[in-house]
Amino acid sequence: MIISDKRKIQRHSYAKLRQGFSLIEMLAVMSAMSILFTAAVTTLAFLMRVEMKGTERLENKLVLQKIAHKFREDVSTAQNAEISKQNSQQILKLALRHNTSITYLTNSPGEGIRREYHREGKLVSQDEYLLPLAGVTFQTEIINQQELVSMELNIPDETGHENKTLQAYFQLFRCEAQLNRVGQIQKHSEQTE
């Protein structure tokens, strides 16, 4: 009976010791958790980068819409368009009525377009449209006895590979409007009355 009690005590004490985890089990769990944590952090970083690029593309599209709307509005109310070059950048000057003008020019290279509103030679307001630009070109052409003014923006395509040694791709954005369209519509309506 004494021997069986000793065995019970030994089994009971061994069972108490066995309630914890061994060092190998703890290391296995910790390594599995570190692998899962690394995968989760990598995935989260990738998703954040994708979200940032998507937001940037959306902001660029909104800026393009704003500048296209403003450009068409300005050109259609302008009476005259003059393109000049200054320090290797093109400048578009639109002459409006009542000694006012609007000037389109690039900010420092690669940083977008600036629109300046002048009245009697003084700067009244200025708008900046920030875009990653590779180049801006203004053109005037006469088609069917009507003068068209166009603006071409060369925008670097950011959807390419992260390896910067590969050839860069560009998106071409062209916006055009008929010069003095508002004045022509008013003249036409006066003639029909």
Image (cartoon, rainbow, N blue to C red):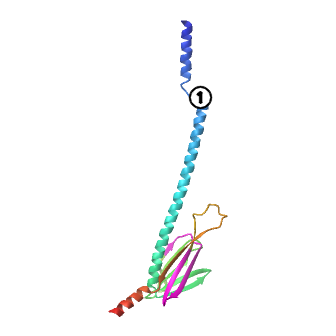
Task: Find out whether residue 51 is within the magenta segment.
Answer: no
Amino acid marked by disc 1: Ser
* Image spot of residue 91 (x, y percent): 55, 82
Q: Residue reaching furthest right?
A: 165
155, 124: nearer the viewer = 155
Q: Which residue occupies 61% across, 30% down?
A: 23
Q: Position of residue 90 (x, y in %)?
A: 58, 81
Q: Residue furthest front?
A: 144
Q: Residue at x 50, y 73 (%)?
A: 128
Q: Is residue 97 left or right of residue 111?
A: left
Tag 1: Cα neighbours inside 10 Å, few (<14), some, or many (≥20)?
few
Classify 178 as above or below 172: below
The vertical placement of 165 against 153, above or below, is: above
Magenta span includes 150:
yes
Magenta residues: mostly which secondary structure?
A: strand
Q: Residue at x 56, y 11 (%)?
A: 6
Q: Which residues lie in the magenta part?
A: 127-153
Nearest to the observer: residue 20 or residue 147: 147
Where does residue 22 sit, x and y in percent of width and height? Answer: 59, 28
Q: Is residue 170 above or below residue 187?
A: above
Q: Which residue is mark 1?
A: 22
Q: Is residue 25 above or below residue 65?
A: above
Residue 166 found in image quarter? bottom right
What secondary structure is found at the residue carrying circle 1? Answer: loop
